[in-house]
Image (cartoon, rainbow, N blue to C red):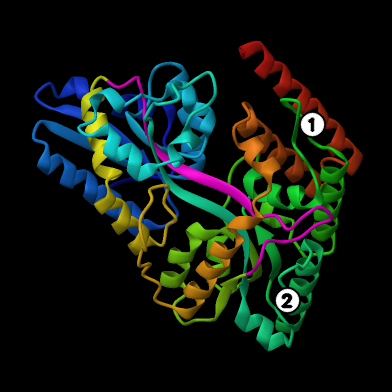
Amino acid sequence: MLKYFSGVSAVVIASVAGLATAHAETRTITFLFTDDDQGYVQRMSELSKEFETANPGVKVNFISSGYDAVSKQLPVQLAVGEGPDVAKITDWQLAPYYLDMRPYMKDAEAYAKLHGVSLEQLRLPNINDPKSINGYVASQTLNLPFVNKTLFEQAGEPLPGPTAKLSEIVEASARVAKATGVQIPFTMDRSGHRFSGGAFAYGSKYVKDGKFTFPDDAAKKYISDVYSWTQNGSFPKEMWGAAGGSQYKGMGDEFVNGNVVTYLAGNWMVNPFQTKIGDAFEWTAINAPCGEAACSAMPGATAIVGFKRTKYPEDVAHFIEFLGSEKVQREIAENYVILTGAEIVNPNYKLKSESAKASMKVFLDNKKNVPSAARDFEKTKGGSALYQQIVQRMSQLIVGELTLDQTYKVLEDDVAKINDAVAVKK
């Protein structure tokens, strides 16, 4: 049975992971999974059952949770030797907890060949063996704006061009909202990752000589512009201000409901959009927003990994080998419109709508617009902490708890503490 949790507490994760000891007759491994596409979540639950059927004596305890709960609580659990055996993650800093499954796999070489260079994304220097197999990259992602084409047409406003600046996209969205009466001109998920594409486009580096340098002058200009958009209503302040601390908040449902002109998200939303929007309106992704430095498509990825805390490394390895097989990866890629890390030849994406087809073409065309500075940041220890501070401080700025100058100062202080903490752990 598929289990859903809006938030998985530390106690729940620990207690679920401990079920193996309560059922001595079976070997229970816990799989913690999160995704915005509920069809994909359901299919992963079914695949877990298929593995159970093919492997008598093994039980896969599948848990679906919200992204925020996983991102915040999983690192804490792993740090004290608890948590699941397998999980979907976005935080590469969990690398010290990975299980090297190469010795336990049935055909490690074939698996490594299928997943190719994507396996290198999971490994961190001086932490993971250069030949280790720790799991697989479940999806390669890019952040781009989605636009409601129907609203642009109703407003008589042309879609932003291929080299449009972020400021021009926001301004055009505001004109469309004013002309059509839509509530939200421009928005993005309450996420440090989503926020950062614009910062890199403005020329921010985030990292210099192995240390975080945020906010540099380019980041300050970007923060100032974002703040100005919240003040003039182009980017409604309630979008970030409604949640507290560094809590993640997705805005996809607002776009689906036709309440948003432009929504900065990523290719993982294409399949949910084509299902939820249907023929209610036309939509598409547009090119990476430009700034003074570049037109930047913020990269990201998710991964399915095994953890060395497991009592059953061989079962975990065989489960990962099953999920990461060519057959399963092709099915996932095609049915849920996912750019997998596995090298699937000529995937036949199930794109039911012209809007989805147009969007995927834009995402594939923008793979060349990934800034090298963003790739450097991906593997820098402490990156998740910086993302959380960005969300918290930007929220305080937007709701008026901090001035611009105070925001820059507290972010500088936050970054100094992160750099100190990283240095101590080295």
Quarter of the C terminus within the rendering: top right
Secondary structure type for disc 1: loop
Q: Which residue is mark 2?
A: 177
Q: Is residue 81 visible?
A: yes
Q: Quadrant of residue 282?
A: bottom right
Give the residue drawn at x 73%, y 78%: 176
**Total labels drawn:** 2
> Residue 362: where, in percent of width, then height?
57, 68
- Say whether residue 352 is magenta: no
Nearer the N terminus, badge 2 or badge 1? 2
Give the residue drawn at x 67%, y 17%: 421
Q: Residue furthest right?
A: 405
- The magenta segment is 286-310
Amino acid type, residue under disc 2 in the picture: Ala
Amino acid type, residue under disc 1 in the picture: Thr
> Residue 72: where, in percent of width, then height?
52, 33
> Residue 16: where, in percent of width, then height?
30, 29
Q: Is residue 399 visible?
A: no
Label 2 vs label 1, nearer the camera: 1
